[in-house]
Amino acid sequence: MQFLLAFVVVAPLLGAVAALLPAPPGLKGKNPDQAVLRHGVTVTGAVLIAAIVLAVGFDHDHPATMQATTDISWIPALDVRIHLGIDGISLPLLLLTALLTFLCALYSYFKLPAGPSPKAFVALVLVLESGTLATFAVLDLLLFFLAFEMVLIPMYFLIARWGGGQRQAAAWKFILYTLLGSVVMLLGILLIGLKSGTFDMVALATDNGRGLTTSVQVIAVLAIGLGLAVKTPMWPLHSWLPDAHTAAPTVGSVLLAGVLLKMGTYGFVRILLPIAPDGMRTFAPYLAAFAVVGIVYGSLACLALARTGAKGDLKRLIAYSSVGHMGFVLLGIATMTPTGVNGALFANIAHGLITGLLFFLVGAIKDRYGTADLDTLAGATGAALYGRAPRLGALLAFAAVASLGLPGLAGFWGEMLTLFGAYSPAEGLSRPAFRTFMAIGAFGTLLTAAYMLIVVRRVCMGEHTPHSRLSPDDRAPHAADGPEPSGAAGARPAATTLQLADIQTYEAAAWTPLAALTVLAGLWPAVLLGLTDPAVQKLLAGGKS
């Protein structure tokens, strides 16, 4: 188990180095570019298999106990240790990261985004995976910070070199926001380490803030919380996210939404809740207030983008939806109750699965149409996806209703549990205030349903507005003409009957696991809650089971 966890964290980094080296003669094949992409699939596949074996070997009877631990002195002068371990909180995030990165590598093997050398692309994706996995596995505050920062440079280059329009500006905005937040976070981490005498997260969680004065905890929560809030992202520190998602390549958007955003909320749960509980209690009402503003703001922004004539970009709309969904995660954390925190962790996983699938689908739609503009997609298509690529349309509708929190799918449980947690927050928190936040959050679920259903109606069903129809010359390069529907001759321009390529085999391979897990988590939530609940109970109790 120790070896497996170390392998999961280190193997992608070694794979990144190997990707940049010349391929051995026997592995070059006829196409060196395909060889390095195959290398990426192999490494991420091996990491996923190791993560699954790790999950199978995990002691599910004691998910609150740190398992597969490694504890080696690294910098004795600062008492910094290479301390690794997983429990019921970090294991699901570890598996989600390994799965999404493998699916992105598999998708890129067949659909590499336009840009420089595939070698650099594969190496950056593997470095990104290693940093994210390390963030969820390390148990030392300084190592956490290093892993947290390790993902920034790869994501910057993925956006700046393989992204679409305005990619340079979006990449700079991403890196500046996150780096400035990280500088403040480092000050908070150093404050905790210097005042407590250790950077060990397990020891600090067991101490439960008793070695830190309330003023130190308040300052630490403010400093670390700002850095985590930027990465989450929390309103009003979210403005880098829509630009980054809009410009990023498809796999960049999937990893950004499905993995990187989880690092911020994980830091709130793993560091601030157990290590500085008094400081969190001070800031919890403000965190909850920002969270519910983010829920409503994200939904209203999506409604504005979805309306006819707004020229809204579908990728940008899904990015704004992430601001709202992560608001539910922050609201659950702010309740400081087992119900709310479990709901936040569940919503984290659900968001990774559903939004990852949505970004895959939007990327496929953009490839086919040559645009993600909602007015163009809706007005140019006649029967739209249901009539032109029915399986693609059906899967988009499925992902949309999962995102709006339909009961029976993964998106439902996280939102419901966070609202229940807000109804009865932890002792010392204002119950009337949190019930007000609960009501605002519940209103946000209605707004989410509204914009998601508008998207399904417009993109999957289309709008019969002749002015905005695409001409045959404007369609995606690989779209093929299809036969005129029976009885439709002369009823509509020929451009509306053009058929699109439906879901391809490689797309089905990349998307099916996400759809299946969305259904599984929705129908059988105990699989995930059985892991997280004992660990959350212990975390909130100051390390006591």
Image (tube, rainbow, N blue to C red):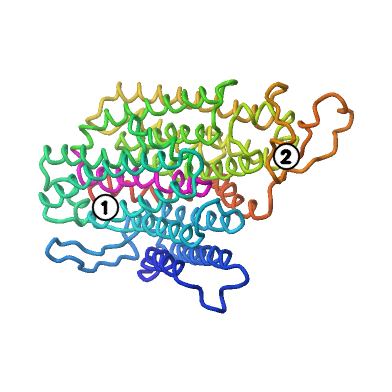
The answer to which of marks 1 and 2 sits earlier in the sequence is 1
Rendered residue at 73%/43% (across/down): 479
- In percent of width and height, residue 292 lies at 37, 27
Please indicate whether residue 514 sits to the left or right of residue 206 in the image.
right
Rendered residue at 38%/57% (across/down): 133
Rendered residue at 69%/44% (across/down): 477
Where is the N terminus found, in terms of image quarters?
bottom left
Q: Amino acid at mark 1?
A: Phe
Please indicate whether residue 369 sits to the left or right of residue 451 in the image.
right
- In percent of width and height, residue 272 lies at 25, 43
Q: Residues within 10 Å of mark 2 (few under 14, many from 20)?
A: some
- Between 540 and 252, the one nearer to me in the picture: 252
- Between 119 and 50, the one nearer to me in the picture: 119
Q: Secondary structure at mark 2?
A: helix
- In percent of width and height, residue 459 lies at 64, 31
Number of marks present in the image shown: 2
Residue where numbered disc 1 is placed: 145
Q: Residues within 10 Å of mark 1 (few under 14, many from 20)?
A: some
Q: Amino acid at mark 2?
A: Pro
Q: Is residue 250 magenta?
A: yes
Q: Is residue 298 magenta?
A: no
Residue where numbered disc 2 is placed: 390
